[in-house]
Amino acid sequence: MSAIHLDRMFHPKSVAVVGASQRDGSIGRVVMRNLIDGKFLGEIYPVNPRHKTIWDLPAYPSLLDLKKRVDLAVVATPISLAPQIVKECIEAEVAGAVIISAGAKESGAKGRELELVIENEATRSGLRIFGPDCLGIICSHSKLNAGFANHMPLPGKMAFISQSGAICTAILDLSIREQIGFSYVVNLGDMLDVDFADVIDYLGGDPQVNSIVMYAERIHQVRSFMSAARAVSRVKPIIALKAGRTRAGAEAAATHTGALAGEDAVYDAAFKRAGIVRVKTFDELFDCAELLAKQPRPSGSGLVIITNAGGPGVMAVDALCDHGFEPVRLRAETISSLDKFLPPSWSRTNPVDISEDASPERYQKVVDVCLKAPEVNALLIILTPQATTDPGGVAEILAGQLKGKRYPVFTSWMGGRDVEKGREIFNHAGVPTFDTPERAVRAFIDLFQYSTNLEMLQEIPAKLPGKMEFDQDRARARIQEALAKKEYLLNEIESKALLSDYGIPVHRTQVAVSAEDAGQKACEMGFPVAMKVFSRDIIHKTEADGVLLNLQNESEIHSAYHKIIAGALAYNPKAVIEGVSIQPMFKHSDYELIIGSKRDRDFGPVILFGMGGIMTEVLKDQSIALPPLNRLLARRVMEETKVYQLLKGYRNRPPANLALIEEILIRLAQLVTDFPEIEELDINPLLISKDSACAVDARALLKPSEIPAPLHLVISPYPNQYETRFAHKELGELFIRPIRPEDAPLMVEHFETLSSQSLYFRFFSSMKRLPPSMLARFTQVDYDREVALVALCESESKEKMLGVARIITEINPKHAEFSVSVGDPWQGKGIGAELLKRCLRIAKERGIEKVWGLVLAENTQMLTLGRKLKFAVKKILGESDYELTIDLTQPLDF
């Protein structure tokens, strides 16, 4: 649904516990104890028809007997009673319920029926539900422990969301020992209603949260999840442990792509696209959580390692190298400063080995020098217990020194009982400490990866050289014809025709049905030629001895034809052999690639890129991306493979035309964006030679789809349907369309046309330039969450952005805020009005009911426009500003 009503659940003024009890061992007792012992700030209402009082509080027979406003109900009864309690919640206008009760879908058909009743009631009424089979929810700020977790966490600004209650309790228990604080701990349970997307959306807007850690087994409502994660990860790091990494695999794929694009690889690609840092183990999740909770994010990868023993320093360096990094090189000035007090035998490099006899004071001096060194982005301090070492004394002297630094500072006190006191000192001081250097380095790299993700999310994609053209109608006709005939597996000719409709270059191919026919077509085509078996039933042609190359004359053609047919029938006697395909031999190719698509059950179509040819499935050098793609995203999916290093040029091999490969990837992504019926699509090999590319072999698998385009995607594509031309009486024809990521340079130019007054009216503050993060935010929009239209004046020389209007949805998706910006030279010409009117129509079409915006009193043009468009204009009490509101449930008369 959305994050609506979650605030009343996490920060309730009152909580009703249905099934409250004082009986030992009962869930109702644990919930009541947790609320009372946690010193919940609001009212607590026990609900149990068998008791008059519970925990010295008046008890009520049912929710309907309360006659008081209830924000949150905790259901601690058997699951069989939950549907009736949910109905009472709705009647009593409760904001939401936490259903702790287990045994719904796990108990079979009857349990699933119970869930359906609960789900239907919640959907109909808007009641929000956590669970069933839910540990509960915890909010430190409101002192709410609405569930049966044993502890309240220490206060902090990190939130934890988990699909598993057991993982929640384990994290909570460890957090107490390690002195890690949480603002929220949320167990989603069966996610009948509230899911990851809802909670991430809510936490993204809460100033009490600066980072989010999550444990997931499977993501539901994937499009909503991707939308929420992409929005929030730009401002707050999200760290995820996705379990079930080894279960995935393609069992009966019709193409190489289908076999290679396994479920876990798709999750990897999705998390990257959403800006999420993925960890692989529980240890890694907790270690990263500790660093997030206690330290700032690193600005770079410059890690300095301080150690009192050589071996642990080497271990840390090895761990860094395993992740593709090296320790930062110390500057001459830093080495000179350390030389002044370290023994002559010190390492004079990074790791900084300060010798086994290092005193607390020596540690302190070294740390002080390194903290001031400009090359340092992070500091790892290692100690191993030596005869002359005082682990507790070193920790004591460093604990205060390491607080509040501008970059991450963390420690590894290695050993057992001898170093325990030092670890305890660090934990109480809020300094992360790890038992091994490897764990410390891995946590740092995970944290640094978020910074890298953020940079990637804000990177501006380049424009394509020209506008892409697609023959969508012809492609649709081909697909519909094949589906009507139930010929779901397209042959090579049909597959290549489909690719050609979208501008993907294919190799000339003809089909021959006899040896004589093959000879004639080869002569017409010109020798040498390649011959391949032509059959829908044989996927891997080389395995069936179904490919012969470099055939030089008609005699070789006749012999090859019979050999291929015989080999194919021996390989699969039941195969329907339609003949052979004939192609001219490529004179030369520099590289063989594979490009394809597979429809994932959760994430829809995914794009695969990698090394092609007969070694595709052996080498498995490939990467995966989610459509839609632009040039930047296409380049990134290429960069994640080993073959990319070859494509840039290697020794005597020339560099490939990378822009052309990017374009082919974008065209393929558009094809599967437009047609959800494409189940699998495979181009293998795509031959690359100098400035040309050609699909030599291709295969497509279709399947009827009940989901229309583009709803089958988990990332909303560019909405072409909102592109229009507008005839302006003074400026001529203007192009009005949704904003694109590639519009960043135009947005900067538009910003520069705004006077200081216009900037103040738009941003409510003085701004001299658009920061990169804001520029990315304005141009890289989520089309599911935001309507953003630009007015462009197109001339022969260049485009010019005259104005921008936006409508951005809130936590309640029925409400949205608007903004308008028009460059000073074009103000007063109706451009802002035209953009806003179109935005409002789109908002109404999407079911948004209320649009509002704040306008300064001096901004008389905007106030006039608001009144003209029938906005209600209301002065804010005690302020000079105005709030403009329009009700989109009413007809628009413009």
Image (cartoon, rainbow, N blue to C red):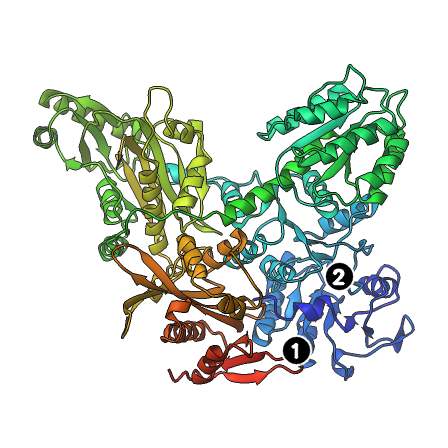
Query: Which structural element holds mark 1?
Result: helix
State the image coordinates of residue 471 (x, y, percent, origin top left).
23, 54
Residue tagged by mark 2?
Answer: 139
Rendering coords of residue 539 (x, y %): 32, 35
Disc 1 target residue: 90
**Dot 1, how many residues are within 10 Å of its Cα: few (below 14), some (14-19), or many (20+)?**
many
Inspect the image, locate mark 2, and give the three-letter code of the amino acid beneath it.
Cys
Q: Quadrant of residue 38?
A: bottom right
Query: Whole-percent x and y of residue 647?
Result: 37, 30
Q: Which mark is residue 561?
A: none
Q: Secondary structure at mark 2?
A: strand
- Identify which residue, 366 or 438, lies in the foreground: 366
Q: Is residue 843 left or right of residue 211?
A: left
Q: Is residue 886 left or right of residue 662?
A: right
Residue 710 as seen in the image, left or right of residue 158: left
Q: Residues within 10 Å of mark 2 (few under 14, many from 20)?
A: many
Residue at x 88%, y 61% (from the top left corner): 24
Q: In which quadrant of the rendered image does the N terminus lie?
A: bottom right
Tell whether 388 sits left or right of 664. right
Q: Choose top left, top right, bottom left or bottom right for residue 437.
A: top right
Where residue 457 appears, as percent x and y from the top left, is: 51, 48
